[in-house]
Image (cartoon, rainbow, N blue to C red):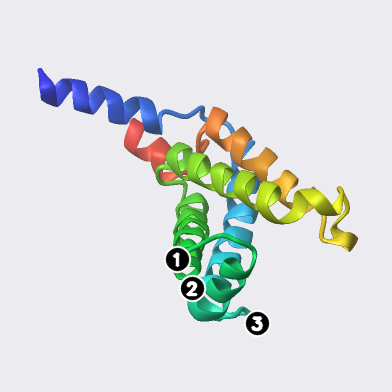
Amino acid sequence: MTTSKNSSTFNNIIKTDATLAALPLRILAGIIFAAHGAQKLFAWFGGYGLEGTGQWMDSIGMSPGFFMALLAGSAEFFGGLLLIIGLLTRPSAFVLAITMIVAILSVHIGNGLFLATNGYEFGLSLLAITLALLVQGGGKYSVDHKLSK
């Protein structure tokens, strides 16, 4: 009984429609998230790595900064990779949506909407994408779709 219940729960998590709508959302948002996470974790693409990002997070009151940088960087990097392949799309999208809400409220909200003033429009766009993926799932060309068959 427990095995079938666990299997049913897993199937509900990965269940997705066989549409193509999620594909560009997953791939493009996944690349953006993975790149931003790589900046925080590994100092790639001009990022500051865990030490620098952690110091900045401490400076804005998100303490302990190193741990917060590790959480945000891991969510973005690994969540982005999972979105790209479409594995555990809904849980990944959920974690990334929470990450975007935190970024918007803790960093960008006081700067207005527009990106030119370090506003929240980019974070809001990524939040919209993650919410769409949370509702829809990974779509036809995802690992989730293959596993759910």
Q: Residue beneath label 1, please?
A: 70
Badge 2 vs badge 1, beta-carbon distance below 8 Å = yes
Q: Which quarter of the rendered picture does the C terminus lie within?
A: top left
* Drawn side of residue 84 relative to residue 119, left or right: left
Q: Residues within 10 Å of mark 3 (few under 14, many from 20)?
A: few
Q: Residue at the location (88% across, 61% down)?
A: 117
Asked whether residue 141 appears in the rendered view, the answer is no
Amino acid type of disc 1? Leu
Of the pair 67 and 36, the residue shown nearer to us? 67
Looking at the image, residue 37 lies above or below residue 24: below
Q: Residue at the location (57% across, 73% down)?
A: 53
Query: Which mark is first along the chain, 3 or 1?
Result: 3
Q: Residues within 10 Å of mark 2 (few under 14, many from 20)?
A: many
Amino acid type of disc 2? Leu
Looking at the image, residue 145 lies above or below residue 95: above
Amino acid type of disc 3? Gly
Query: Which mark is first along the chain, 1 or 2?
Result: 2
Q: Residue beneath label 3, please?
A: 46
Q: Residue beneath label 2, please?
A: 41
Tally of marks: 3
Q: CA distance from mark 3 to mark 2?
A: 11 Å
Asked whether residue 68 appears in the rendered view, the answer is yes
Of the pair 67 and 145, the residue shown nearer to us? 67
Front of the two marks 1 and 3? 1
Q: For mark 1, give the secondary structure.
A: helix
Of the pair 63 and 92, the residue shown nearer to us? 63
The image position of residue 123, as x and y in percent, is 71, 50
